[in-house]
Amino acid sequence: MDAQTELLQQLRAQNVRFVRFIWCDNANVIRAKAVHVAFIEAYLAGEGVGIAAAQQALPVMYDALAPGSGLTPAGEVHMRADWSTLAALPYAPGHARVLTDIYDGDQPWAHCPRGFLRRMIARAAQHGLAMFAAFENEFSLLCPSEKGPQPFDDTVFCQTSALDQATAVLNDITDALAAQGVQVEMVYAESGPGQFELPVRYADALRAADQQIIFRETVKAVARQHGLVASFVPKIYPNKAGNGAHLHFSLWREGRSLVTEPDKPHVLTAEMRAFMAGVLHHLPALMALTTPSTNSFKRIRPRFWSGAYTCWGIGNREAALRAPQPPAGKPITNIELKTSDATANPYLALGALIAAGLDGIERGMTLGEPVNGDPADLSDAEREARGIRRLPATLGEAIHALENDAVLLDALGEGLARSYLAVRRAEWEAMKDMPHEQEVALLLERY
Ligand code: GLU
Ligand code: MG
């Protein structure tokens, strides 16, 4: 039996009526057109589902084109399924979903985020490098009420009673993820009201970004089945802990981790250090892709463990780049970028991270000394002497940094850089002075 017939049989056996063709746009909204199985054969054979090219010009607020995107209402591109990602949806009986790459005719479309990440993975491969990664998400559970959504609980970090209250929904999320091949590693209550964290197993970079889409979709849908709202909005409650999606990554060559020296478990390799230096160098601009909403910048504040300064540290939760401190005698396995949240399109975030890090390797950038302790406690002079800068405080500043970052712009390519910046500028203009409650209400269901 050929692969297509097998897929078709699989869909019929699972009683699937619709297959959702999923894409995630420049505003990081996850969207789908669902094809009825009666018509799926042509798509199995490679035909794509059409969408307007203008989809990549839509900001988060509404379905209207951002000015200056270079895209117009004329023009059609096609989503081609990556059938290796097909899965029936445990939370939507009769529906399956597949992740897609967008094509312009028979060429990958310049504005396709998944295509961008594929290009950056290929660029790393030219250096003989592969990246493994995982997004470590925090999210808030809320209960709908007449007064608007209220926090699910009021517990503190790792308080067990939060797990007792949320056992059913957390178990169902975990099972639904497992059914789609995403393995939850741990669960605990985070510091904020109704806030939880569910780290998942790492995977190669493309799969890690795919997992982030699957994770967000599943958490929101399963919570809804429990009569709850789950939201990844970075800062829902102005003075409580925010929701990060810390980006954990490691570099590999020929199946061997390049994070530390083989016989020195605490010594980062020269390549890893240069990669990290590249990330820190480009971080102000990179933030326009890893923390790209107006709301994101309310989370990135000193003393909230969200990485507000360009520095790195071992086991330091106030450093933008943290090397998680391993148990005695064990190697450091990965590096964590804290300046990342789930309002980021994961393909763009991960692709741009790779581009920034590779620039560090190509230009032989030097990583400074690790910072122990809170960089906010250093004097301005000390920070200056050590090259520690405060990261952008608003989306406007991050957009400005990206507009001036030739390396990241070149990596994105002319078309994607233009449409992406147009979307973010439109969001900044529309939302920079929006009252907090209104901003959260707008974003709560999008992310
Ligand atoms: N909630 C913190 C953030 O906004 C992170 C807390 C932690 O897990 O270290 O990134
Ligand atoms: Mg956490």
Image (cartoon, rainbow, N blue to C red):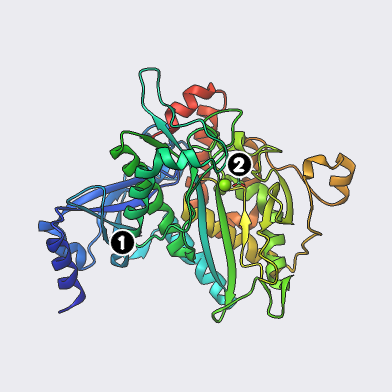
Please state the horizontal and vertical placement of residue 210, each as a whole percent of the image: 41, 58
Q: Secondary structure at mark 2?
A: helix
Q: Quadrant of the C terminus?
A: top left
Disc 1 residue lies near ligand 1 with CB under 8 A: no
In front of the other: 438 or 325: 325
Say which residue label 2 marks: 399
Identify the residue at image location x=32%, y=43%: 221
Measure how far apart labels 1 and 2 are at the Cα level.
31 Å
Numbered disc total: 2
Near-viewer residue (95 or 323):
323
Can residue 342 be seen here?
no
Could you tell which of marks 1 and 2 lies nearer the N-terminus? 1
Which residue is at a point 31% across and 37% down the rendered structure image?
Answer: 226
Q: Quadrant of residue 266?
A: bottom right
- In the picture of the structure, the residue carrying the numbered disc 1 is 105
Q: Quadrant of residue 1?
A: bottom left
> Could you tell me which residue is drawn at 69 percent across and 43 percent down?
308
Give the crowd class for mark 1: few <14, some 14-19, many >=20 residues within 10 Å. Answer: few
Residue 436 at x, y percent in the picture: 53, 24
Q: Residue 100: x, y in percent?
A: 33, 59
